[in-house]
Amino acid sequence: MESLENDFSEIASLLGDKSRAIMLWNLLDGRAYTATELANCSGISLQSASNHLAKLLQKNILSVEKQGRHRYYKFSSPDVAQVIESMASLLSLQQDYKKVKKPKASAFTYARTCYNHLAGEVGVIITEALISHNIISPLNKEYIVTATGKQWFLKLDINIDETQNLKRSFAHQCLDWSERKHHLAGALGDVFLETLLKEDWFRKHKNTRELIITAKGKQHLKQLLNIDL
């Protein structure tokens, strides 16, 4: 038991450091970054950033991939990204926290990526619409795709059986830190967002996790889910 407590304390300490926390927050866009880029975003020297990254690699929080002269850092698994995003939900427990008013369509809290799936107000609205149309159904902390849902996703060229066979969580509830409600995550959430981007219903905002919903996307989501975005 003491060993487990010490291990947990060490991981909590790793995530709690301000510079490392900023690095991890920026990695939530799903891309890999060099040590120089992570140093710049956290406002520290390259040497200091390298020391922080070495500690995160040692505990399997991050993984690194070499390409040419560069080394690119990213989360070691989607589970790690889920933990980092979930930590943000604690923001609303602070006494001086103020819920952001409904932002403009391009704002960070309106539509953004959460690792590789859709988050923000739009992510919650779409998830709730999927539930109300009996496409998915919440069960404990997961989502179950109904028979109706399998056919619905197939219209978007998303094969549910193939997606379920991916070696990771299929469809789980991710607590959206800005909305305080759940959105769709897991392999299904990733494939769903990938499809929305491929169909040009959403576009990524350059150098940020913000997403922009297109006129085409608004039209199709209105037809498919009867939602106005």
Image: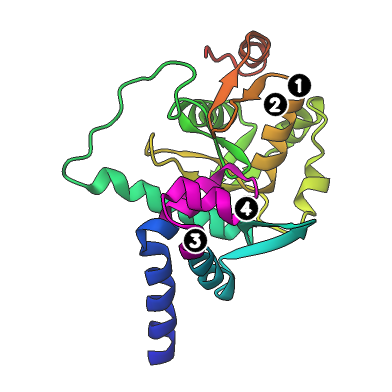
Q: Which residue is mark 4?
A: 34
The numbered mark at residue 210 is none
Place of residue 206 in the rendered image (x, y in percent of width and height, measured from the top left): 60, 27
Q: Main secondary structure of the magenta part?
A: helix
Looking at the picture, which amino acid does disc 1 mark? Glu
The numbered mark at residue 49 is 3
Whichever of labels 3 and 2 marks the residue nearer the N terminus, that label is 3
46 and 156: which is toward the camera: 46
96 relative to 110, above or below: below
Place of residue 114 in the rendered image (x, y in percent of width and height, measured from the top left): 54, 41
Place of residue 126 in the rendered image (x, y in percent of width and height, measured from the top left): 55, 27
Residue appearing at x 16%, y 44% in the figure: 95
- Residue stretch rendered in magenta on the structure: 21-49
Question: What kind of element bears circle 4?
Answer: loop
The numbered mark at residue 199 is 1
Q: In the rendered view of the protein, which quadrant contains the N terminus? A: bottom left
108 relative to 223, above or below: below
Tell me the mark number nearer the camera, choosing from 1 and 4.
4
150 and 167: which is toward the camera: 167
Q: How many numbered marks are there?
A: 4
Whether residue 141 is visible to the viewer of this picture, yes or no, is: no
47 and 5: which is toward the camera: 47
Residue appearing at x 54%, y 33% in the figure: 208
For disc 3, the neighbor class at 10 Å (few under 14, some 14 to 19, many from 20) is: many
Q: Which residue is mark 2?
A: 196
Is residue 28 found inside the magenta-colored segment of the image? yes
Looking at the picture, which amino acid does disc 3 mark? Ala
